[in-house]
Amino acid sequence: MKGESRKSKFVGIRMTAAQEELLSKLRETHGYKSQTEVLLNGLESLAGHSSVPVAASLSRDYRLQEHEEVMRKVIEVVSKVDEIIDRHNKDKRALIQILLEIQREYNWLPKEAILWLSERLGVSINQIYQIATFYKAFSLIPRGRHLVRVCTGTACHVRGAITLSDRASQLLNLSP
């Protein structure tokens, strides 16, 4: 071990003992709390910014914008689901019909819609998920606006359904 340079990891980078010592001096001299802070400061200096708070501020602004966008989408979903529920007079017996209308509106069942529906109708989330996973009409993952379905039953299979499906996928650049 004597004479060999000791290497350690720093944000995925292997450093020599000299580099590690320089990093420690920078941390002590400038009062940085972490190696990441040293790295951010160095990157900001290269980018023309003078301090870590600039990156933190930009990052915080970006997170706020993302948060605002998410909240806008949630509010839109909740208000649309409210309209659908109100059309059915908050009747628990209309749960499947309400889910179908939500599915028609979004082409899938957004999590926010399911949570709000559960709250408004007093139905457990588990019950809603049981219905949503039982019927093929419902999707819990986002789907495209248009669905292409190819029958793969025995009669259709014999007549080349798989070939048709593969060719359609290829032409439309879709995955089955």
Image: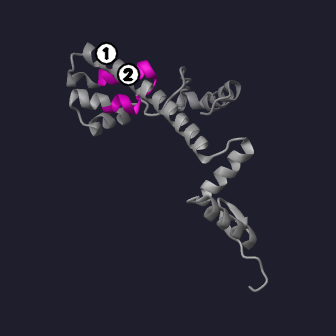
Percent coordinates x, y for residue 56 in the rendering: 56, 43
Amino acid type, residue under disc 1 in the picture = Glu
SS type, badge 1: helix
Left or right, 125 with respect to 158, comes to left
Q: Is residue 101 magenta?
A: yes
Q: Amino acid at mark 2?
A: Ile
Other residues around mark 1 within 10 Å, as few (<14) / some (14–19) / many (≥20): few
Magenta part mainly helix, strand or loop?
A: helix
Q: Nearer the viewer, residue 40 or 76?
A: 40
The residue under the point 79% across, 83% down is 3
Label whose residue precedes the other's in the sequence (2 or 1): 1
In the rendered image, residue 71 lying in the magenta stretch gets the answer no
Image vertical order of residue 86 relative to residue 26, above or below: above
Residue at label 1?
A: 83
User: Which contiguous range is marked in magenta?
Assistant: 96-115
Report how far apart the C-alphas of labels 2 and 1 lie in the structure. 10 Å
Task: Residue 80: name its quadrant.
Answer: top left
| Mark 2 surroundings: few (<14), some (14-19) or many (≥20) residues within 10 A | many
Q: Nearer the viewer, mark 2 or mark 1?
A: 1
- The x and y percentages for residue 71 are 42, 28
Question: What residue is at 24 percent from the left and 37 percent from the top?
Answer: 124
Q: Quadrant of residue 72?
A: top left
The residue drawn where x is 54% and y is 28% is: 155
Question: Does 42 sit above or below residue 172?
Answer: below
Q: Classify residue 91 by image quadrant.
A: top left
Look at mark 2 in the image and give the residue it sits on.
102
Q: Residue at x 53, y 32 (%)?
A: 154
Instruction: Check the image and tell me how it is coloured.
Output: one colour
Image quarter of the N terminus = bottom right
Q: Position of residue 110 (x, y in %)?
A: 41, 30
- Give the percent coordinates (x, y) of residue 139: 43, 31
